[in-house]
Image (cartoon, helix red, strand yellow):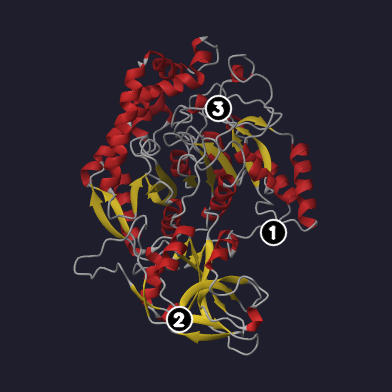
Amino acid sequence: MTALGPDAAGARTATAQARVRAAHARLREVDRPEVWTLLLPEADALAAARRVDQRVAAGEHLPLAGTTLAVKDNVDVAGLPTTAGCPSYATDPRGRPGPAPRTAPAVQALLDAGTVLLGKTNLDQFATGLVGTRSPYGAVRHATRPDRVSGGSSSGSAVAVALGVADIGIGTDTAGSGRVPAAFHGLVGIKTTVGLVPTDGVVPACASYDVVTTLTRDLATGARATRIMVDAGGDRSGRRRWPADVRLALPENPVVAVPRGADLDALAPSWRVAFDAAVAHAQAVGARTVEVDVSGMLAAAYLLYEGAILAERYAAVGEFLAGSPPDADPTVAAIVLAGASVPAAAYVRDRAALVTARAHALDVLDGCDLLLLPTTTDHPTLADVAADPVGVNRRLGTYTNFVNLLDLAAVAVPVGVADGGPFGVTVLARAFDDQPALDLAARLLEPVTGDGTPVRPGTAAPLVVSGSVELLVVGSAAQPAVRRALVDLGGRCERRARTSEAYALRTPGVDEVRSAGARCQRTPAPGEAPTSPPYLHGHALTRVAPGAGASFAGEVWRLSAAALGTLLASLPAPAALGPVELADGSWVVGWSCTARTPADAGRGAGPGRPAVLAAQGTR
């Protein structure tokens, strides 16, 4: 498995100050004032960059040093107004008057990690739209095709990144507001499972379904920023955490659901051709695709704007818009104010309908690892939207509006060209299967040779899940059953390693490892023997005196806490899990035998002591 990291994405060696100067030079070159609602003076951005460079020079590790940030203006930044695309909202007592008292935790975490803020970006007012034209600050034109829409509602952030001004664009995504502009600009848009990233300091669109998202030019940067935001502080009362059995990797040959032909009728002809090519690409990088009926998912989308869920939009900003502010966008105001008349019983009814729709979606995806869809349907012009603002917007949300309602994670990636511009797909996953979705996205971004062979087979995205455990498996490379067992447990092979010269090797016997609790097991192909439960002929280590044994080669895997517990419960005596010393002096969990030597007496954490495993190798 090859991880996409800084080298793959292009290592950043410039100082933060140099990057800010380059960003402002690019700003002057492109001259796109409609992208921004507020642009910080270059001197202020340089002062912030200078502080980042000083921290780096002092030895501090800042994973986002040397990058620039654009923040959608419905997200708070301390000392700056939050307009949500409506200037009077930042002055009216019914809105958010005055500068924000504190920065939204998701953004603060990025700033603490070394990125430098350039300014606040334009959006479809109150994050209501997928077109990027519903703003008194002006319609945000596409970065390279000025007669086309930029996509919204995170329009300004997407264009700032696409133009090379910002490296990370912060958006929000309730119905596709990060994914659609990503598709139009050939960007990566990461929308996590609802509730993982804190939404404190965000003007709500539909508070139950809002997600703070990233827009980047490469997957590695987006994944790093996403992990930082997921791990951010803030109010934990409404937050969700990674489950104990979270999957950390995509199988080598995943089963990927794709829609039936009838479910693709909304696509423009050239976009249908491009999607068929994307499915072929997925197959070339190892996926086995199966057609499924997604019509029920598509139907659920109507509840967001045409059902009682609309009441959430009124609850967010309806009182303000009911005062008829002069800078309200008329289309947005009409949509939001319609939520005032929703009866409470209708809201309860539609929330119950969503519970049923979610269960149906899980049934449709049963036996599949992921779902692959086109991100949107076509790329309209500004004139198209002006002629039919609601109809065009509804069409663009065909494959995005239902995603948060059905509690799915999503990664939008560019995979080709359609109608003279970028074409993108979205990898969808069950809640908390964000990492497998990112891994397939990484594979889709990899080129294939003329005969359809991946250039870098097994490519994986950087890990966005924290709190996993490292496990050393000796001899696993020669044992397919061992690898399959770990894959079925959602494990992730990270690197090769060697033990210190303090071990002897034993083979305790045949160890049955059951993959109980695995979130989504691969369905065997026709004629293929089932692999669960797999039988594992494992090699276990016995620690001897330092220097008196040998150094053994193995692989370091990452597992969730629950997966490690399942593994531990499956091992027969005398096999156990315990700390193993690597050749570099670090310690990880490994297969061992319970025999101990006097050399281990003072450690208190020797082999055969599973009570201390959770503290070993976590991050």
The residue positioned 48% from the left and 24% from the top of the image is 134
Q: Against 240, is 483 above or below? A: below
Callout 3: 10 Å neighbours few (<14), some, many (20+)? many
Which label sits in the foreground, 2 or 3? 2
The residue positioned 34% from the left and 26% from the top of the image is 391
Q: Against 100, is 490 above or below? A: below
Q: Earlier in the sequence, mark 2 or mark 3?
A: 3
Name the amino acid, label 1: Thr
Q: Earlier in the sequence, mark 1 or mark 3?
A: 1
Name the amino acid, label 2: His
Residue 430 horizontal side relative to residue 226, left or right = left
Cβ atoms under marks 2 and 3 closer than 8 Å: no
Viewer can see residue 268 = no
* Residue 183 percent location from the top left of the image: 44, 44
Q: Quadrant of residue 382?
A: top left
Q: Quadrant of residue 91?
A: top right
Q: Which residue is mark 1?
A: 13
Q: Which residue is mark 2?
A: 539
Q: Which residue is mark 3?
A: 203
Cβ atoms under marks 1 and 3 closer than 8 Å: no
